Amino acid sequence: DAKRRGRNTWQRFNPELARRQSDRVQVEGQLRRALDNGEFRLVYQPLVDLVDGRVHRAEALLRWHSPVLGEMSPDAFIGHAETTGDIVRIGAWVVHSACRQLAAWRREGLALPRVAVNVSWRQFLTEDLPQVIAAALAEHDLPGEGLELEFTERVLIEDAPDTHDSFERLRALGVRLTIDDFGEGYSALNYLRRLPIHGLKLAQGFLQGVPEAPSDVAICQAVAGLGHGLGLEVVAEGIETAAQREFLLGIGIRCGQGFLYAPGLEVDDFAAYLRRVGC
Ligand code: C2E
Ligand code: MG
Ligand code: MG
Ligand code: MG
């Protein structure tokens, strides 16, 4: 009870903890209204061919401008949205917005092959994702190949009985399936044999130490070797320097994203980028 626990937890007022808790309450309170208030938008980061710089596809990244809290980065609110469950509605909005944008670009004559969206484990486990995806594709008259889903390893370790079934149904829609931040999570390699995925995205933490840190170099090489050995596409994120680009090409990674090329761009800026470099 409170008295017994009190000895350890309430002995001293912890201002840092109190501040974090009131932040959490505030963020969660604001999040609840954010979708209906139209406070979210997507920015698009190009994934480019590392040889010629042309655009392969785009990753849609969520941005939240709260009138109360200001500009919030996903790392500051996605976790809260997962806790409250708001991520399920937000995630569906992300899928629809990305599909709507891709369809609009295509109508404008921009031949962008594909847009990738991030899917939260909570969203994956809560709703019938294949059904949501199929509806979004149909509504915007897009082929499944136009969409890619990025899952973190968290989806895989939850190991719900119907994970495999969901992946098969998504794959049957023609949607591309990628494991994001590969190597950063729990990395049970077992699922690589079981699940019908198309690609791996190397966690950017490993690329940060390239080319100076031998352990990061070794891990990048191993991930590339593993992915390619399994017939998967391996892409990189967080490419910031020409040296990293050279290194990636040397280990057979030909596609990636990073500030060396462009950060997440507002819709019009992305279209301008695409017009300039082509795809
Ligand atoms: P992620 O999916 O791994 O996305 C890549 C993150 O790396 C993005 O951060 C991007 O802006 C950043 N980045 C790209 N290139 C570079 C680089 O060269 N240097 C550095 N330092 N960073 C780079 P962002 O947009 O802040 O998103 C963070 C994370 O939030 C994402 O990581 C993803 O896990 C999550 N997220 C973003 N949008 C969504 C969404 O719509 N739904 C869900 N569930 N999660 C999202
Ligand atoms: Mg991602
Ligand atoms: Mg990533
Ligand atoms: Mg990440």
Image (cartoon, rainbow, N blue to C red):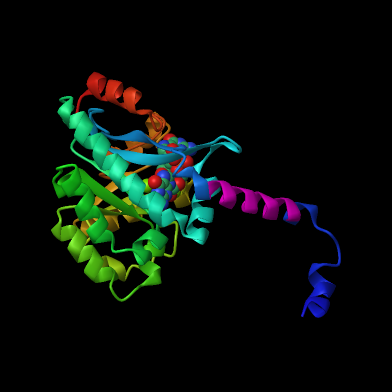
Q: In front: 247, or 123?
A: 123
Could you tell whether 137 is left or right of 244 in the image?
Answer: left
Task: State ligand 1's quadrant.
Answer: top left
From what the image shows, is residue 7 above or below residue 217?
Answer: below
Q: Main secondary structure of the magenta part?
A: helix
Q: Which of these two is toward me, 5 or 68?
A: 68
| In the image: residue 217, left or right of residue 67 | left
The quarter of the rendered structure image containing the C terminus is top left
**In which quarter of the view is residue 141 placed?**
top left
Q: Residue at x 38, y 59 (%)?
A: 123
Q: Identify whether 241 is placed above or below 237.
A: above
Residue range (magenta): 18-31
Where is residue 90 drawn, in percent x and y?
A: 40, 49
Residue 174, percent from left and from top = 15, 53
Residue 207 visible, this angle: no
Residue 87 location (% of width, % of height): 43, 54
Name the residue at 22% across, 31% down: 104
Please provide percent x and percent y for residue 58. Answer: 29, 37
Quadrant where the image shows the N terminus: bottom right
Q: Residue at x 37, y 51 (%)?
A: 91
- Number of numbered discs present? 0
Query: Which residue is rendered at x = 39% and y = 40% of the image?
Result: 61
Q: Viewer-proximal residue, 69 or 152?
A: 69
Is there any visible trace of residue 233 in the rendered image? yes
- Say whether residue 23 is magenta: yes
Is residue 237 one of those drawn in magenta? Answer: no
Left or right: 91 in relation to 11? left
